[in-house]
Amino acid sequence: MPEKILVIGSNSFSGASFIDHALRNGSEVVGVSRSPEAAAVFLPYRWHGREEEKRFRFHQLDLNRDLASIMELARDFRPEYVINFAAQSMVAESWHNPDHWMMTNVVSNVRLHDHLRKCDFLKKYVHVSTPEVYGTCEGLVRESTNYNPSTPYAVSRAAADMSLMSFFKAYDFPVVFTRAANVYGPGQQLYRIIPRAILFFLTGKKLPLHGGGHSVRSFIHIRDVADGTLRVARQASPGDIFHFSTSRNVSIRALVQLIAERMNVSFADHVEIVGERLGKDSAYLLDCTKAKKELGWEDRITLERGIEETIAWVKDNLEEIRKQPAEYIHKP
């Protein structure tokens, strides 16, 4: 029998990409998201017309409003693994309605965890967290680094993480945490920097570059992260934290310059410098030695290859992509 996985936040970029990977690896998957299934262009598990899709079901349920229905679904499906991607995830926008971020990322998640801890069928709960909980750090960030969140978004994620660790210590709740560097790849929402730059360059718009693009990041392809996430579910010990990152660190400016070069457009003509975002961390560079040693995980897709894939995805689907929202739309 295939292993059963319940994915919460299945419409997210990371959630949809993980489902694609899990189906490829023989799992039976149920996806839950508060919105109807996204347009197929944003759902990698819908791109192939594969036999594997018969092992996937989707349910539109909102973690904030439909917890009873989510738990009824979980008790009926009895998944070995629950992977939670659901979160209010935009950093800058979290300043405008911080209570919305606290409700989804803390209150609703804690309610979910309090129900899941009583489920005897659950082998592992994988909580997809974020490096934002660390704030701005010097050097490589290890899993033991203290939290120092600097935005409402980061505070809300750190609070949920700390609550989960208390559940692990008090109840032996089988939680494992993942934190990935900036993920990207085909299927990503258009307000994220890589697909946004590609779309703007293709359509002749000027790309706003906040603060001149001097903050440093490590960008990792979503398929490498999906691989690591499934390994965590299958192999990791409860209470553990794992980082997924690459050893290549690049400023946002250098990243956009690379995209411009790959698309043969002028960086100067297609970019405008705008003010920095409030509370933006200058750098968080993750040490992923633990994932490599304990899970046998490796990042395999280079930034150049990943950017080429994403450019091809935008070009191949440009007609459909132009119909989709290019800006973030907040949902309480």
Image: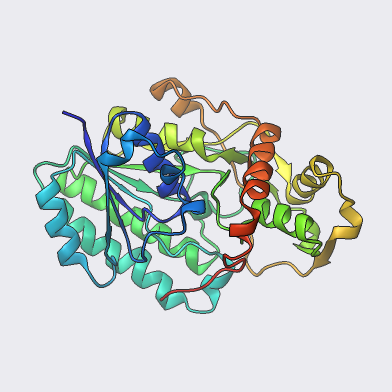
Q: Is residue 243 above or below residue 98?
A: above
The spot of residue 72 in percent (x, y) is: 12, 58
Judge whether residue 65 can be spotted in this image: yes
Please name whichever residue, 56 or 32, is drawn nearer the observer in this view of the structure.
56
Q: Residue at x 84, y 42 (%)?
A: 261
Q: Residue at x 68, y 48 (%)?
A: 315
The spot of residue 328 in percent (x, y) is: 56, 68
Q: Residue at x 32, y 40 (%)?
A: 53
Q: Residue at x 75, y 45 (%)?
A: 255
The spot of residue 63 in percent (x, y) is: 28, 65
Q: Which corner quadrant holds the N terminus?
A: top left
Q: Is residue 298 above or below residue 62?
A: above
Q: Is residue 177 above or below residue 274?
A: above
How was this image coloured?
A: rainbow
Q: Quadrant of residue 32?
A: bottom left
Q: Is residue 148 left or right of residue 268?
A: left
Please name whichever residue, 303 or 312, is drawn nearer the observer in this view of the structure.
312
